[in-house]
Image (tube, grey):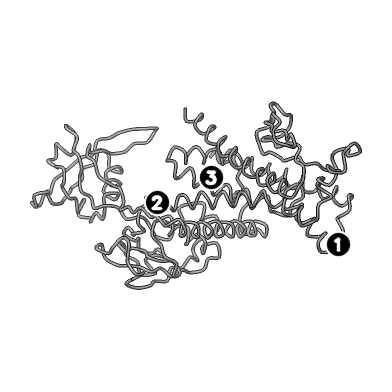
Amino acid sequence: MMLLQTVLAFIVVLGILVVVHELGHYWVARWCGVKVLRFSVGMGKVVWSRRYGPDQTEWALSALPLGGYVKMLDAREQDLSQLSSEDLKREFTRQSVWRRIAIVAAGPLANFLLAILIFAGLYSYGIPEPVPRLRAVPENSAAFQAGLRGGELITSVNEEPVQIWSDLRWKIAQHAVDRKPVRLGILRGQDSSSAPSNGRQDETVLLSLESLTTEDLEKDFLAMLGIDLARPAPVLGKILPGGPAERAGLMEGDLIDQINGERIGDGLAFVEVVRASPGKSLNISGTHRDGRRFDISLVPELHEKDGLRFGRIQAEVPLAPEMIVASSSPVQAIGKSIVKTWDTSVLTLKMIGKMIIGEVSLKNITGPITIADYAGQTARIGLISYLSFIAFISISLGIMNLLPIPVLDGGLLLYYSLEVLTGRPVSERFGELAQRAGLGILMTLMIVAMFNDIARLMS
């Protein structure tokens, strides 16, 4: 069932991105007066088609479900000897170079526009997310050296406001690529507001990112810096009958503050100790819900699942972090979505540049298997995560198609740019050689991506 959900989620993502990309080419071609012969979702042999519109454009589904294309009236591909003078005026190569540039660029631009619309919708709707409050900071971490100890609320990164945890992660990731330190605006104290007014802040600390490598951005790099999400205090929830917690005399609402003489900072720390101690006696101290102190001995039961052994005491421990719904007005949402799309594009280009010069491993190139896996994961999490994933992949598709590689839109834009500069189109011979080289580059990238996908699955 999970595999079917992953496949369906991937098909929906791929279908949306391909249709939007090709519609960009189609609409601008029509706007420029170019005749469109076929609009295909998929490549290879046409398996279904219907003709619509004044030009009787063929709308088709093709056998290979990767990509798509818009086939226009083009002297390089069709015999035009029988066409009327009116149709000849609508042939692609007879258009001005600026119209050809607009038609080719419209596909990637449509992908960027889709991302902007999705982000704007999410920002307007409001995204429930954890507030950027910090858990206790480990010693010898970059966050500890910066002066963070835990309980602080992050309000800004380099003077840019931060409302939610994902904002904090994203803004630090942007600067981590260049390993430049960031200034964090913070409010200290557990009683600080989760939505500080007027941008007020207690102080600013400087967080070093020198310890991070570019590969770390694929991992939990915030934890590597000593930054983790704050969790609630270790207050017990429902106590299951007959379990170790009930037998030891624990009750709902009890607050745990020490295990074996060591202070317990939050509920997650309590759960981690219990899980790591199956069959071991734990000396637990705390305060009952009526205010009385207690000191008890408790032995977590041994449980096994998927080959893992861990301890349980049959008691609920709430771990949900402090949440906020960050929403914006439609105008603000559009502005934020444009900035988000731009920042994501810049970060992607930086990563590509570092990959070219060898600072980033080629292992970071992903293919359809990894994309399908992420599509399934985000679909299972919820609609907001799934839509965010579609937006990020749409940006990646737009960037990829703008790369100056022949056979991609960016390669054609390179040809037309040379035509603008020189006043004449590139020669057919040069175009043929460049197409072969571009196809070779593209095939190599696809092989590397597939190899990396399979390696990830195997590991």
**Residue 437 location in percent, x, y?**
80, 48
Residue under numbered circle 3: 390
Q: Which is more N-terminal, label 3 or label 1?
A: 3
Q: Which is more N-terminal, label 3 or label 2?
A: 2
Q: Is residue 15 above or below residue 223?
A: above
C-alpha distance separating marks 2 and 3: 17 Å
Q: Is residue 419 visible?
A: yes
Could you say which is closer to the camera, residue 27 or residue 421? 27
Q: Which is more N-terminal, label 2 or label 1?
A: 2
Q: Give amino acid for label 2.
A: Gly
From the viewer's perspective, is the residue at label 2 or at label 3 nearer? Answer: 2
**Residue 260 location in percent, x, y?**
20, 51
Could you say which is closer to the camera, residue 351 or residue 362? 351
Tell me if mark 2 has few (under 14), some (14-19) or many (20+) residues whose alpha carbon lies within 10 angstroms of its own. some
Q: Are marks 1 and 2 in contact (CB under 8 Å)?
A: no
Mark 2: which secondary structure? loop
